[in-house]
Amino acid sequence: MIRFRTRRQVGLLVAIALSALLLIWHSAMRSSLRSTDVLTGVGLLALVLLLTSLNVRKKVPTAPLGPVAWWMQFHIYGGLFSGVLFLAHAGAGAPSGLIEIWVWALFVLVFLSGLAGLGLSRLLPARLTAGGEEVIYERIPAHRRKLLEEADALATAAAAQSGESVVADFHAHRLRSFLAARPRLLRPLRLGGHRRRALLQELDAQVRSLGKSDSRQMNELARIARVKDDLDLAAASQMLLRLWLFVHIPATYALIIVGAAHGFIALRSGGLS
């Protein structure tokens, strides 16, 4: 069984080697004043179709078509190679013509969203848990409501027990808005975490300054705040993973349709030779 690191290294080396061979061949053809448009265009469309087959492979995981992990590695490094093939076909200049602009824009969108997805798939899986357990996305709102109810009940009980309002006031003025807030989409990218750190520092300071009973209740509020933040992290991570697929997959199918139309029109009009 070939290890993941080995597969990744082999895939990267193959992609680099193919890119180098493509650029050498493309340069030689251009030097001899021979067009590469047909071959690079057909090759690019075929490669995009082949890369799209990963989505089909995922839908039939039991089919005897090889491990999904191998398909994923091919998708990653084939996608990187497609960027070089696209440059060889389209050139570095700005596109001219409406359909060429659409093809260019769609390919850039697919390529960049693919890179974003690759980065997210490396960064986020380790953050898709809350409290050490995987949380189902659809159940997160119910978990958040339960935590808010627990905090409300704890603050009410603390005020009734001690006759003071320190815990209840802190909950009402500082903590409750945090517990009720929706997850921030960029939270998994280490953005927007300042509020949690400041709030937990305040909670720790309150614990040290309170008596035994109140400090125990404030500690419980701190636990609730940490669990809620973990839930926000898991929810935002799953939202990001869904969002990039929502962009990447439709854009890929649109690219196939517009790219095929572009090739058909160019061949019929004699624009490619």
Image (cartoon, helix red, strand yellow):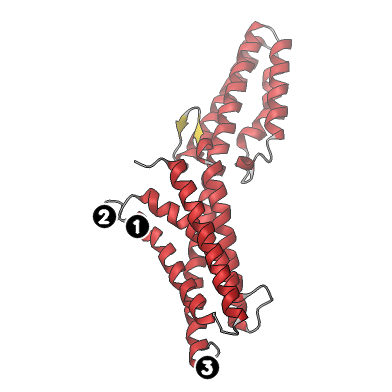
Q: Which residue is mark 3?
A: 269
Query: Which amino acid, by three-letter code, is at mark 2?
Result: Ala
**Mark 1 or 3 closer to N-term?**
1
Label 1 close to label 3 by CB (< 8 Å): no
Numbered label attached to residue 63? 2
Foreground of the two, 37 or 175 = 37
* Residue at x-position 58% and y-position 68%: 23
Task: Estimate the x, y position of residue 85 in percent, counting from the top left.
Answer: 54, 69
Give the crowd class for mark 3: few <14, some 14-19, many >=20 residues within 10 Å. few
What is the C-alpha distance between the residues marked 1 and 3? 36 Å
Q: In the drawing, does residue 66 fall left or right of residue 28?
A: left
Q: Is residue 106 visible?
A: no
Give the crowd class for mark 2: few <14, some 14-19, many >=20 residues within 10 Å. few
- In the picture, residue 160 is in which quadrant? top right
**Mark 2 or 1 closer to N-term?**
1
Numbered label attached to residue 57? 1
Foreground of the two, 104 or 76 = 76
Label 2 close to label 1 by CB (< 8 Å): yes
